[in-house]
Amino acid sequence: MTTTLIIIGVVVLALLSLGVISASLRRRDTDGAFGQLAGETVKRDRGTVDIDEEDAPASKELVSVGADEESKTVAGSTGSEVEAVARAERSGALVKAGPATPVAYVPPDPETLGVARRQFLNRGIVAMFGLGLSGFGAACIAFLWPQGSSGFGSRINVGRIPDIEDAIKAGSGFFYVPEGRMWVTEYPPAAVEKAVGAYGFYDQVAGGLEAGVVALFQTCPHLGCRVPECTTSQWFECPCHGSQYNRVGEKKGGPAPRGMDRFPMEISPSNELIVDTGVVIQGPPIGVNTTGQEAEGPNCIGAASH
């Protein structure tokens, strides 16, 4: 009885030992692969034909490609080896690749990289400068553009000569025409002959001078101030720097480089004064005094020294 129990115990221990060894081998085989191989795969692995080491590299080839990723089946390899290769590929391990044609480098589109804050600010500053300069240029062009058929820069019909003479008397010797930015004053008929030789521009103003009037630009040729009349002295006297001109715009004193500028004049068949304010004629040079008029009363502004 005792001998029988001993034999049974030895058999049980042997079976347990075989189970432990089999489990260890199975665990080591499955540790190198993902998951657990199916029974059919195990049977096929057991039925593969051994291949010599020299022929093994040549026997490995790609036999199928899956819909989502490439799967490689290598003849003469066990399932664990195939799974090990797949595992290495999925884990990002380096795998020797075959020869491939080099692809030319295509730089990315800068617009797809986005706009940096500094680039956005630079573009905004440039745009603001462009808008400012455009507005300034448009304003300059609008200021210098001829006014067309009426207003300053066009030919203005001041009126009939008798009416102009009445307006001059009503203004104490001066008649201001705002739409033409000009003064119209009386020109003595006796001074016309002297003006022929003294004015190099006489032909352009002959019509008005012979009719007894002269059209003067309101701006001082010194620095562009508007020159008002002085009824006491019967001169034009600039309030900015003291330049003085007689009633027909010839310089009498101050820093101005010449007499007051003037406009071309002509008389229409109906005895009307037509002044072309689109053309500015430079005034007579210093020293010209065709009328001989001196101050007829106190000056409104003291004359500046030359």
Image (cartoon, rainbow, N blue to C red):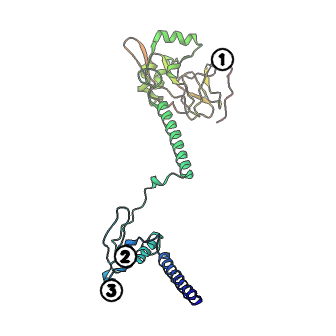
Q: Is residue 89 above or below residue 52?
A: above
Residue at (55%, 25%) from the top-left corner? 218
Under circle 1, the secondary element is loop
Residue 232 bears which disc, if any?
1
The amino acid type found where label 3 is placed reads Ile
Number of residue marks:
3
Q: Earlier in the sequence, mark 1 or mark 2?
A: 2
Q: Residue furthest bottom?
A: 3
Residue at (48%, 9%) from the top-left corner? 163
- Residue density around tag 2, few if under 14, some if 14–19, many if 20 or more, within 10 Å: few
46 lies left or right of 188: left
156 lies left or right of 47: right
Of labels 1 and 2, the one closer to you:
2
The amino acid type found where label 2 is placed reads Lys
Of labels 3 and 1, the one closer to you:
3
**Quadrant (top left/top right/bottom left/bottom right) for the N terminus:** bottom right
Q: Which residue is mark 3?
A: 51
Relative depth, front residue between 77 and 147: 77
Q: Locate residue 301, reporting x and y percent.
A: 68, 25
152 lies left or right of 63: right
Asked if disc 1 and disc 2 are in contact, CB closer than 8 Å, the reply is no
- Residue density around tag 1, few if under 14, some if 14–19, many if 20 or more, within 10 Å: few
Q: Locate residue 129, reporting x and y percent.
A: 53, 43
Relative depth, front residue between 295 and 204: 204
Residue 43 bears which disc, if any?
2
Relative depth, front residue between 136 and 259: 136
Q: Earlier in the sequence, mark 3 or mark 2?
A: 2
Residue 214 bears which disc, if any?
none
Residue at mark 3 to residue at mark 1: CA–CA distance: 132 Å
Res 155 → quadrant:
top left
Q: Locate residue 202, reporting x and y percent.
A: 44, 27
